[in-house]
């Protein structure tokens, strides 16, 4: 299960419910930073204003988690599945039939942790730039779409909602 593999940083635990009101029924989980930022489960107070910069997604997606590098897991209210928004590419992919399946069965696999969530790479970034705070992700400068992202030294912590908004404006603006 998710909590057996991903440890919640108690300093980042949020006293609120997971994500928004339009999620399907899910097992109760504590929003906050897990496993030193590999996954951040977001609470209801997480800003969704950035979605306005992603046309066609505003009324469709409900974000509930993001990765250390700012990609987002969302519940798709139209397709009734979990979608993964690869922010730099602007792509949306079906990744699970339910939030519980994603968290308890998919993300806990060692190959997913190392190769998809990029634990070794994120660990290098964290050792160079420090831990993430709730609401932050590591942002490559320059962005990956502009040729950055290969070197951990190119990353800095930044506000995930601002980052998501700017990338949406770049893709669709």
Image (cartoon, helix red, strand yellow):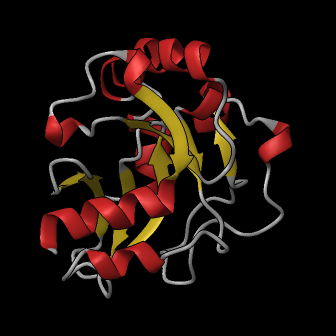
Q: Is residue 120 above or below residue 141?
A: above
Quarter of the figure with residue 169:
bottom left
Which x, y percent locates residue 42? 60, 59
- Residue visible at 48% across and 75% down? 24
Which x, y percent locates residue 110? 42, 16
Look at the image and tell me whether residue 74 can be seen: no
- Residue visible at 39% across and 29% down? 117
- Looking at this view, name the residue that lies furthest to the bottom: 59
- Residue visible at 66% across and 28% down? 131
Figure label count: 0
Residue 144 lies left or right of residue 35; in this view the side is: left
Look at the image and tell me whether residue 22 can be seen: yes
- Quadrant of the image for the C terminus? bottom left
Residue 115 lies left or right of residue 125; in this view the side is: left
- Looking at this view, name the residue that lies furthest to the front: 142
- Residue visible at 64% across and 65% down? 18
Q: Is residue 10 above or below residue 155?
A: below
Q: Is residue 33 above or below residue 91?
A: above
Quarter of the figure with residue 10:
top right
Which x, y percent locates residue 53? 29, 76
Which x, y percent locates residue 27? 62, 59
Residue 27 lies left or right of residue 67; in this view the side is: right
Relative depth, front residue between 159 and 74: 159
- Quadrant of the image for the N terminus? top right
Residue 62 lies left or right of residue 58; in this view the side is: right
């Amino acid at each position: 299960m998710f909590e057996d593999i991903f440890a919640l940083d108690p300093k980042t635990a949020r006293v609120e419910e997971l994500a928004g009101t339009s999620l399907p029924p899910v097992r109760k989980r504590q929003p906050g930073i897990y496993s030193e930022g590999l996954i951040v489960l977001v609470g209801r107070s997480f800003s969704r204003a950035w979605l306005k910069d992603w046309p066609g997604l505003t009324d469709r997606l409900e974000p509930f988690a993001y990765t250390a590098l700012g990609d987002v897991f969302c519940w798709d209210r139209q397709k009734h599945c979990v979608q993964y928004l690869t922010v730099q590419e602007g792509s949306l992919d079906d990744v699970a039939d339910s939030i519980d399946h994603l968290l308890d069965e998919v993300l806990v696999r060692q190959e997913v942790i190392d190769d998809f969530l990029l634990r070794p790479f994120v660990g290098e970034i964290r050792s160079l730039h420090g831990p993430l705070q709730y609401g932050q992700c590591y942002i490559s400068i320059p962005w990956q779409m502009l040729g950055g992202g290969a070197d951990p030294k190119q990353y800095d912590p930044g506000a995930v909602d601002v980052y998501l908004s700017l990338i949406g404006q770049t893709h669709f603006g």
